[in-house]
Amino acid sequence: MLVVMKSHATPEQIAAVCDEIERMGFRPHALPGATRTAIGITGNKSGVDHGNLSELSGVAEVIRVSKPYKLVSRDVKEEDTVIRFPGTDITVGGRDLMMIAGPCSIESREQAFSTADQVAAAGAQFFRGGAYKPRTSPYAFQGLGEEALTIMAEIRERTGMRIVTEAIDQDALDLVADYADVIQIGARNMQNYSLLRAAGRKRKPVLLKRGMSATLEELLMAAEYVMSEGNYDVILCERGIRTFADHTRNTLDLSIVPAAQQLSHLPIVVDPSHGTGKRDKVLSMARAAVACGADGLIVEVHNQPDRALSDGAQSLYPDQFIQLMDEASKIAGIVGRSVPRNAFVQPADTVGAL
Amino acid sequence: MLVVMKSHATPEQIAAVCDEIERMGFRPHALPGATRTAIGITGNKSGVDHGNLSELSGVAEVIRVSKPYKLVSRDVKEEDTVIRFPGTDITVGGRDLMMIAGPCSIESREQAFSTADQVAAAGAQFFRGGAYKPRTSPYAFQGLGEEALTIMAEIRERTGMRIVTEAIDQDALDLVADYADVIQIGARNMQNYSLLRAAGRKRKPVLLKRGMSATLEELLMAAEYVMSEGNYDVILCERGIRTFADHTRNTLDLSIVPAAQQLSHLPIVVDPSHGTGKRDKVLSMARAAVACGADGLIVEVHNQPDRALSDGAQSLYPDQFIQLMDEASKIAGIVGRSVPRNAFVQPADTVGAL
Amino acid sequence: MLVVMKSHATPEQIAAVCDEIERMGFRPHALPGATRTAIGITGNKSGVDHGNLSELSGVAEVIRVSKPYKLVSRDVKEEDTVIRFPGTDITVGGRDLMMIAGPCSIESREQAFSTADQVAAAGAQFFRGGAYKPRTSPYAFQGLGEEALTIMAEIRERTGMRIVTEAIDQDALDLVADYADVIQIGARNMQNYSLLRAAGRKRKPVLLKRGMSATLEELLMAAEYVMSEGNYDVILCERGIRTFADHTRNTLDLSIVPAAQQLSHLPIVVDPSHGTGKRDKVLSMARAAVACGADGLIVEVHNQPDRALSDGAQSLYPDQFIQLMDEASKIAGIVGRSVPRNAFVQPADTVGAL
Amino acid sequence: MLVVMKSHATPEQIAAVCDEIERMGFRPHALPGATRTAIGITGNKSGVDHGNLSELSGVAEVIRVSKPYKLVSRDVKEEDTVIRFPGTDITVGGRDLMMIAGPCSIESREQAFSTADQVAAAGAQFFRGGAYKPRTSPYAFQGLGEEALTIMAEIRERTGMRIVTEAIDQDALDLVADYADVIQIGARNMQNYSLLRAAGRKRKPVLLKRGMSATLEELLMAAEYVMSEGNYDVILCERGIRTFADHTRNTLDLSIVPAAQQLSHLPIVVDPSHGTGKRDKVLSMARAAVACGADGLIVEVHNQPDRALSDGAQSLYPDQFIQLMDEASKIAGIVGRSVPRNAFVQPADTVGAL
């Protein structure tokens, strides 16, 4: 259910409607738009009798929502969601593309700093690095945990890049929300609803990866879980789906980009590294992602891919990432977007030294 | 890595090998077989230098394992795992099939008791019912939680059925492990590795459902996560995979039954309810599952499917479950198995009254 | 469009309706049922103005058909289609299961006779063998062509088995229709509509295999192509679909058996050989197919699988086929079906000699 | 098997090697490259004893080929295949992108001319239009047949566009090869090997669409069938695969573009119309296809999509195609390609009149 306020409704009227919704036992979500505010109602297991809501002053109409998703929908919020990062001029979901780069896992201080310096110098505004790794085998490298988080916090200080890293469970989530700037929920956890709810109670943006066999509706419903707890800063992410095709590790489904943008106001970025699983296809698919309108890219880059403890085969060399940034910038211009550049300059004495 | 002991190795020799493995910083898993004991070694991120192990007395050979799974494998344990339930003569993985029945969700005391009485009278030894429901929508019925667990504990007292119910996160897991007899891990959580590890530290059998797009190897690796923490009583479960086919909700992949049994000693049961999503196909596929060698069935039965809060369209009527038990028994006989019968007799005055 | 005749309509009334339909430029298909005759109308690209049809004597009602399939549907013909083979008491689609066995390809007279004698002695009423092979590579063995057809005609004489073999194009179709008893259309040609139409103009039953990524509706529409040309004896065949699962070559989708039987009156058989691609899973899945209600099985059997020119890895040894017939018989009894037995006795002096 | 000639080998030496291969009972395929000629050998069912071939003068080496494809492979021909159209300066597979546009079906002279004028004026060098339509239903519009071919031949005269149209069987193929410039083999016929062979005996380029569930290797093997008959001008085409995803009709698998270009010298174009099935996603995916390196696009355009007899929902309006050409040109420039422009100017008096 959705309460649409009149365009001239006052903050007091909006607050009064929210109070009434709470009094009815539900949860109001005020979503300001350019010309009007809509108030989503969640927590209603079945239909709500909305008789009195439509009577309140400032209310234009009360809409029963038939789609299973509400808060993620353009019906509720017509304008694109633009996410801002305090203390910076970085935005996600607006004209600027979100360029995220870094290694699959933080393996050591040296590896992380070397890679970070190079991707920051290439212009990346976001650094990714795994502290907690969901590995298919219990015996594989599982990440450095909090030690990796402290290394990434130092990288933020040094380079100005914002930090994106995955939380795999409640314990990791608390630490990730403390240290990082964007909480990543991985594909394997896209329907771990307890984790989604917990992420919805944090106050950091959430990067939500599509599950390997998730439909668009299921992805949107996973975002709805996060938003239903009050965290509206969700970034969707296509990272390849599981099909019979075997020339890539997954099949990158780029058509979900325009499809998601049509239904939802949330930004959507693309991961061509997991989406292909092969280094020699990452640049092609990164260009394609920008061309089809993605709001950003998340790319694996490693200073020495051949020695990576995980996903080396799909990690770019730093020089390839420079080329990717260059090509993405040019294509962004054609589709009315731009690639902002981190102003970090790698200290001359550390080039090659790290 | 696997240490195979000689057939006449003494308990002292086995203990000495385990001690040595722990001294090396790894974890030993002694797995007694009919003629010999094998000791699996886990915790080694890369190769172990096994020089001295092969020198210890009682050791027949030390095998490097190339497959990513170890403890789930028939290489480590040749004989079928047979799980026993203390205080009963119920077994899973032996000659007897594990017949699990009950509603998708515990909705009320009346609904649960009525359904339970009927499936117990039809012979079921295991009762299933959801206390915590992983729902695609955050606004859908999420289960009664601990209240449902207490209802099911009463049902165990009343009918003698063992209780199978899903744990969706760490908090639920602790309660489920307290109240229930089998901890179910759902398809959406098959790669929630933190939850798998936590289940591995409990001392109740785990029913592990195959993820919607999981390969057999990924299913076995998920079981390996549970076993690597010391809980060896894992029951695999096929519940349909996601394909393009649209005549059923999922595509039930029965061929995984003989495939899993070939690679692993763990029992594997089949869920024809979620596997088809349609009541009128459940009996056909239940027969097929028993015919191809499944170690049991998990079936949704509801006293009033048309009023179910979840999954009503795939729930059997109690009369259909009686027919299912009958057909399963006959086919079980042909493939060298049997369907044990719960001796519960529904009190005459409650038939139809509940 | 469908004209349903009254239950006491005379042959003359039926003929008059058919004449009128032809006069309107369409094609009538009289489909006699147990209590009434229905007349399907095809050839109408869009809606037909049926005003006068409903006025004709003997007409009960005229139904607009919304489903894209007509002739295959139970709406048109409620009773199961039972196909008979002239000069024999063999039926398909009734109580008796259609058991088809033989090698993937006819490789030589010796190989074919040896295999045929053994499967006939085991009770098979139908012999399969490829004369024209659709191979992924143009350089692989493509079949012996007409020579293979003559060998199979001899096998029919010798053993009494009816012959099932694939037609891959128009030229092959003409020969197959001359020599064989059942025309097989392979999975790769399920949407080769010219071939389907041509098969519809032959007067031999057609065994139509489901394409690797065909939905049930597409399979039924392919059958509709055959039937729209006047050949109503179509046998559907499930042979596995393409999915991400890699423990079998294809994923055998047994749930299509009850689903097809619900929508269509046509018989449906199952191919566990292609459906799994692995010999050690064929018996399990053959049992499962019979248990879920399939109208028959088509199984690859080779006298020397290890020397087969094609598909050796999925071909049964003759002894395994004897076991399959035995298990199928027992399960058939439980589901109200039976496995008829060919009375052929292998001449004592040829056992092992061929 | 592949015979690699020395870089200075004479035409006589090459001819002598071909003669020897024929004498051995096989078929030679001389494939001239920039610096050397390679001679592929086909027709060998199993290994060839190549002893004497390596002895012939001019021979550098004889290579046993392990991959199942030969002629399609970059191992046989390192340089990109560039297809030329006699009497024009049009090329496919070089720097210029192949831009193909037109309606799904030729429905009438007026519809075809109106659409053709508009796409030619927008710059398209190739016109597509269905004369023979493979339709799921036998009762749907099947195309105008030869009448459509004559209309398209007139369009070629009028606009200078080359004609691309599908052949669905042997009869259609003969006519298509007479009238059209490029023979299209549809997705449903990708493994109709008799048709592929027949197309291989024609002397017009073949546009080969990927089957709905075809792997890259199967697509290449289908091209190999065409080439094995001596027609080396094959253009691959990605048109979407069948997956569980339901936000588009098919899932456009763009990663096959770089994957095919790595293994094969053949050009590969992309069909974003069938690839998405939705008009509002065609432009996004067309841009993405060019960005990832496709050698061209095949796009459905209709003068009145809402009245189309087939596939109207995925057909662009002519104005949208103008935009597509513009965006494709800009992106082509970034990836080192260009979009050539047809010089056709729509006669002023026919604009809007047709």
Image (spheres, coloured by chain):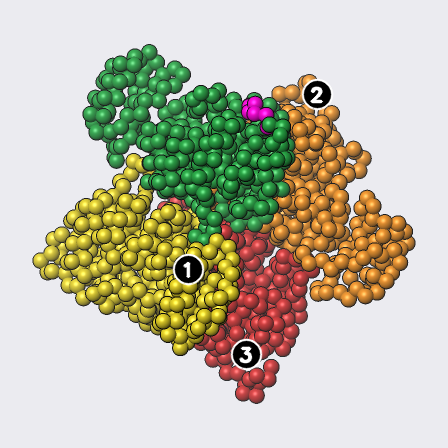
Chain colours: A green, B yellow, C red, D orange
Q: At 47% across and 35% down in the image, what residue appears?
A: A151
In magenta, the rendered stretch is A340-346
Nearer-the-camera pick, A159 or B70: A159
Of the two numbered discs 1 and 3 in the rendering, the one whose residue sits closer to the viewer? 1
Chain letter for the residue marked with disc 2 in the picture: D
Give the quarter of the image for residue A119.
Answer: top right
The amino acid type, in three-letter code, at marker 3 is Asp
- Residue at the disc numbered 3: C117
Does residue C197 appear in the picture of this structure? Answer: no
Q: How far, Cα to Cα, is label 3 from label 2?
A: 75 Å
Q: Residue B23 — which label?
A: 1
Chain letter for the residue marked with disc 3 in the picture: C
* Residue B98 left/right relative to B261: left
x and y percentages locating residue D267 in the rendered image: 69, 41
SS majority, magenta: loop
Does residue D59 appear in the picture of this structure? Answer: yes
The amino acid type, in three-letter code, at marker 1 is Arg
The amino acid type, in three-letter code, at marker 2 is Pro
The crowd level at tag 1 (other Cα within 10 Å; few <14, some 14-19, many 20+) is few
Q: How far, Cα to Cα, is label 2 from label 1?
A: 90 Å
Nearer-the-camera pick, C3 or C149: C149
Q: At 39% across and 71% down in the image, what residue appears?
A: B13
Q: In the rendered view, would you say A249 is above or below C87?
A: above
x and y percentages locating residue D328 in the rendered image: 64, 29
